[in-house]
Amino acid sequence: MDELLQHIVNGVSLGSIYALVALGYTLVYGNLRLINFAHGDIFMAGAFAALFASAGISLAIGPGLAHLLLVLLAAMLAAGLLGLAIERLAYRPLRKAPRVNLLMTAVGVSLLLENLAQVLFGATPRVFPTVLKEEAWLRLSRDISVSNIQVAVLAVSLGLMLFLEWLVRATALGRAMRAVSFSHELAALMGVPVDRVIALTFCLGSSLAAAAGVLVGISYPRVDPLMGVLVGLKAFVAAVLGGIGDIRGAVAGGLLLGLAEELVAGYVSTSYRDALAFSLLILVLLVKPAGLLGRAAPEKV
Amino acid sequence: MSAAAEAVLDVESLSLAFGGLQAVDAFSMVLRRGELAGLIGPNGAGKSTVFNLVTGVYRPDVGEVRALGRRVTGWRPEAIARLGLVRSFQNIRLFRDLSVRDNLLAAMHAQLPYGLLAGLLRTPAALRAEAGLGERAEELMGLMGLEARADEEAGSLPYGDQKKLEIARALAAGAQVLLLDEPAAGMNPRESQWLMQALRRLRDERGVSILLIEHDMRVVMGLCERVLVMDHGQKIAEGTPHQVQRDARVIEAYLGSKKG
Amino acid sequence: MRRHPNSLALLALLAAACLAQGAYALLPAYPATILMLCLINASLATSLNLVNGLAGQFSLGHAGFMAIGAYVAASITTPGVDLLGLAGGALAQGALAQQALFALALLAAGLAAGLAGYLVGLPSLRLRGDYLAIVTLGFGEIIRVLILNIPAVGGPRGLSGVPAYSTAFAAALFLGALVLGISRLVGTSHGRALLAVRADEVAAAALGSSPTRFKVAAFTASAAAGGVAGGLLAHAMMYINPSSFTFMRSVEVVVMVVLGGAGSISGGILAAVLLTILPEALRPLQQLTGVDLRMVLYSFLLIALMLARPQGLLGRRELWQLKGRP
């Protein structure tokens, strides 16, 4: 029972990270109908940005909440700018092109980011600096505890998700985003600056991914240039699981995947935990391609 | 055309809702063999949606479709087409990078396939089959006046010829029932005259039954023996062109739509 | 349908194969290996062109099918692999028996990979194109992970001692057969229907051709061919390892197809040769800088091509169709 609880705690923690990254996918997909292959690598870029930011911040502030917040800010800012640049340089020129071209460019951007990272930072993994000194906080039982890091992960994820929910539901920007996601032409007719909204959406999605990168950094203190590949793919699976294009779906999918992965790793086998995500993907696409919360949109003929 | 002519298309109480919008509401109609019928109505009345429902592109929420003696509700579009119920598209959907001839040949595949292996090995049987397909394509191009452009890319044809190719392609696919979505759109009076004659010939010489969606009233009045009128997803009138022209509800629908 | 009699085609095929073998025998070791790689890469590009070019889809998992083919073939021929390998090793005494075994192994490779292609393609090709990319990518990864966990074929250490059965003759014969098959396909009714599906799925369905059936068929054939190429590769390199069949490998083949022009068989072969030789030429530079230049090259190439010349070198036309029109 205790073990199960621990797995659940870990699963929720992992799941919230997947959810954050999945949100980025879903936001971009909603606006552009594009699977941003490079999204996972933006997550990686965020983690690295955090790494360097932390090194700088450590000169003034030691580990703790303030340090974490500053690192988060720095990483999210850096990734947001990166996302803006990618959208402007690589995706916007292809707005009218066949979707396959856009997908291929995304693959190219992803590879470029990975290779650049390997050239700049070397392929060997680095240790993420101590942003928060790990302490056990909640004692659920004799053996099971929730660490402050896991609380931080949950808190940050929740905070960001609530912020996003507020943004989309209650602000003009959110309305604009929803309009663009429905139809570019109609949104333009209503006076929405489509290009700018798309750019901002990219920025937003990228910062969320970067936040996830920071959270991963503090949870599993290893960063390497290829860390985005697997996480990116799994987060995409999570987004599809929940129904791509649907914000609540991304969160639900992320949590579900995180839990499933933890349980499989704990009770079945660790070597197959990666294969779980892809198997789930194929299963979902077979049974309900629209995802758990999504609605199948018939193609206009 | 006797009243006893069999029904080649029988639509019963078809309904479809998109989100909160009722696109088609309890639509019923019967098309008899050899009929030339028209489906008209203001923009957004649901006419193309009916086509999509009948040809299997959309699945109806409620209702049944029977075509050429079979119950086809829920069938995939390709299966319905193979039965002989073929449609054209409002925004032309030609195979743009294929030649005119290849567009027609490709459309014949489902009806007249020969073995893949035989084709790869160029067996005499396959070569004969190909020759047969070629002849049929020539015939259809002649029918539609497209022989001169046989090897041109479909995407580079003038608009009128593209529309003709759409129809020729539907015939190539073995259409016994032709559903044409605004075939006269963008045609000048001379072209639409030609179209009406061509469609009438198709019915007279080949027994093809035709249902067309049209906004061009000259074509509807001049060609259709029976007209159905739709508005807001429902059938609001049905009868000869003359009858429908005077129907109060029809007039209301068209005038009303101009106001809104 | 052009009528080149089968006998002529067969003759041309054999002649080309003999030419390749002759060249291979005459060249010094290093260029000979390059020739072999060119032939195999050209086969890979051609096989992927069926899906990414002619069918107009986007598959990112070709390495998975290569891996299946490579491992299945190697399991049959390599002594030291339980069951099949030991039996294979025992049977293959003498050059003729060895080549016969090799042919059998390649057939098995193709069948296994083709089956996998069918199983993966059937559910995924019903969906919108973007999903196929991810699913194939995921599938490639699953295969790799699975192979890593099979100790009988070496797991992470890989499988060494694969007999060197691959000849330039066999590779060229296979490539030639692929090219012949596909160029003939385009002239048949089935080929035209496939191109129609690529041009407009909805219209093709409305005319009676099931887009899913055609896409799955193309995908299956492509996978099978990729498997055979994988088998050829295994018996040329004499050592295979799951890390030779990563996502990167799939991307390499995709870049070859895109660079040549998706849908152009000759374009794909041209690009394959180019992209086999170029990295070799860059090797001294790579050793100097210590950077994997091949990957940088591919990523730049992909982006640059999509932004500037998405139709690649030849677009959809073949070398023999270029009449001076741009």
Image (cartoon, coloured by chain):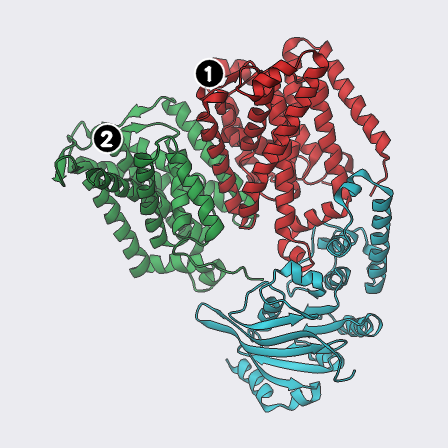
Chain colours: A green, B cyan, C red
The residue closer to the viewer here, C178 or C267, is: C178
Element class at badge 2:
helix
Residue C90, placed above or below residue A120: above
| Rendering quarter of residue A203 | top left
Q: Chain of mark 2?
A: A
Task: Name the residue tied to disc 1.
Answer: C289
For the residue marked with disc 2, what is the amino acid? Ser
Mark 1 touching mark 2, by CB under 8 A?
no
Q: Quadrant of the N terminus of chain A?
A: top left
Residue A225 percent coordinates (x, y)? 38, 28
**In the image, is C65 to the left or to the right of A130?**
right
Residue C276 percent coordinates (x, y)? 61, 22
Taking the spot 70% from the left edge, 60% from the top edge, the residue there is: B82
Residue C313 percent coordinates (x, y)? 66, 34
| Rendering quarter of residue C59 | top right
Q: Chain of mark 1?
A: C
Q: Is residue C306 visible?
A: yes
Q: Which mark is residue C218?
A: none
Task: Name the residue tied to disc 2.
Answer: A54
Taking the spot 52% from the left edge, 19% from the top edge, the residue there is: C82
For the residue marked with disc 1, what is the amino acid? Thr
Taking the spot 23% from the left edge, 44% from the top edge, the residue there is: A154
**CA–CA distance between discs 1 and 2?**
30 Å
**In the image, is B207 to the left or to the right of A219?**
right
The residue closer to the viewer here, B223 or C110, is: C110
The residue closer to the viewer here, C161 or B210, is: C161
